[in-house]
Image (cartoon, rainbow, N blue to C red):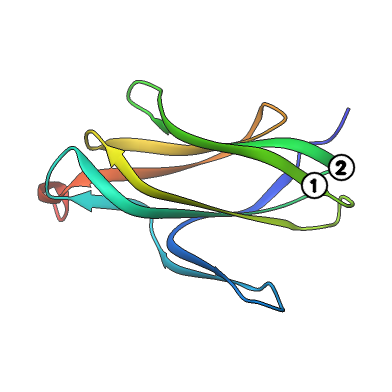
Amino acid sequence: MKEKPLVEAFILCDELISEEGTNKKSLIGTFNSIVSTEFPTQHPKICVYVAMANGQGGMKGELRCVRMEDQAEMFKASGTMQFADPNQVVEIGFSFRNIVFERPGLYTFELLADDELLTEKRFHVLAAQQVGQ
C-alpha cells in the first residue's frame, strides 16, 4: 500500500507565475477570503498552489471546491500526479476563472490523492457589510 503524499504548501492567490528556465514559483495576492458587494458574485480568478512530497509513482489527484454549509461541490479539477521518488517535491498550480458564488459562507478546497482526502484549505466568501464587524 502506498503512503499518502505529505502536503508542504496549499495556498490561494490571485496569480501564480512559473519562471521560465528555473521553474521557480511566484504567488501574487495570497488570500483567505473573498469579499463582494452583491450575490451571486462572479470572482474573476482563483489560483491554488500545492507542493507535496512523499508520493510514490503515479497517483490520481483531485482538487474540489465545496460549500461547507450544505457540502455542495462548486467545481473541481482532476488529473494524474507523478512522483519520481518519495523525496521529490511535486508542485502543482491550478487556475479557475469566473467562478460564481451564489451566497456568502465558508468554503473549502479539498485535495485528494487516489480518492483519499489529504488536506483541505478553508476560505470565506463575505458580503462587504460583514467586513470590519
Q: Nearer the viewer, residue 74 or 125?
A: 74
List x then y, in percent, for residue 66: 42, 31
Query: In the rendered image of this protein, does residue 31 appear above or below residue 130?
Result: below
Dot 1, how many residues are within 10 Å of its Cα: few (below 14), some (14-19), or many (20+)?
Answer: some
Q: Quadrant of the N terminus?
A: top right
Give the residue displayed 33% in from the left and 36% down from the top. 106
Label disc, if present, on residue 124 of the rendered structure: none
Instruction: Tell me, yes or no, whether the two marked residues, 2 and 1, touch with CB atoms within 8 Å.
Output: yes
Residue at image mark 1: 82
78 vs 44, left or right, is: right
List x then y, in percent, for residue 34: 29, 51
**Which corner quadrant of the image does residue 88 belong to?**
bottom right
Give the residue displayed 83% in from the left and 49% down from the top. 83
Q: Secondary structure at mark 1?
A: strand
Residue at image mark 2: 57
Give the residue displayed 65% in from the left and 73% down from the top. 24
53 vs 96, left or right, is: right
Q: Mark 2 vs mark 1: which is more N-terminal? A: 2
Dot 2, how many residues are within 10 Å of its Cα: few (below 14), some (14-19), or many (20+)?
Answer: few
Query: In the rendered image of this protein, does residue 34 appear above or below residue 62?
Result: below
List x then y, in percent, for residue 47: 47, 55
Q: Residue furthest bottom?
A: 21
111 vs 129, left or right, is: right
121 vs 34, left or right, is: right
Give the residue displayed 72% in from the left and 40% down from the top. 80
List x then y, in percent, for residue 63: 56, 38
Residue type, label 2: Gly
Residue type, label 1: Gln
In 3D space, how far apart are the residues under numbered discs 2 and 1 (Cα atoms)?
6 Å
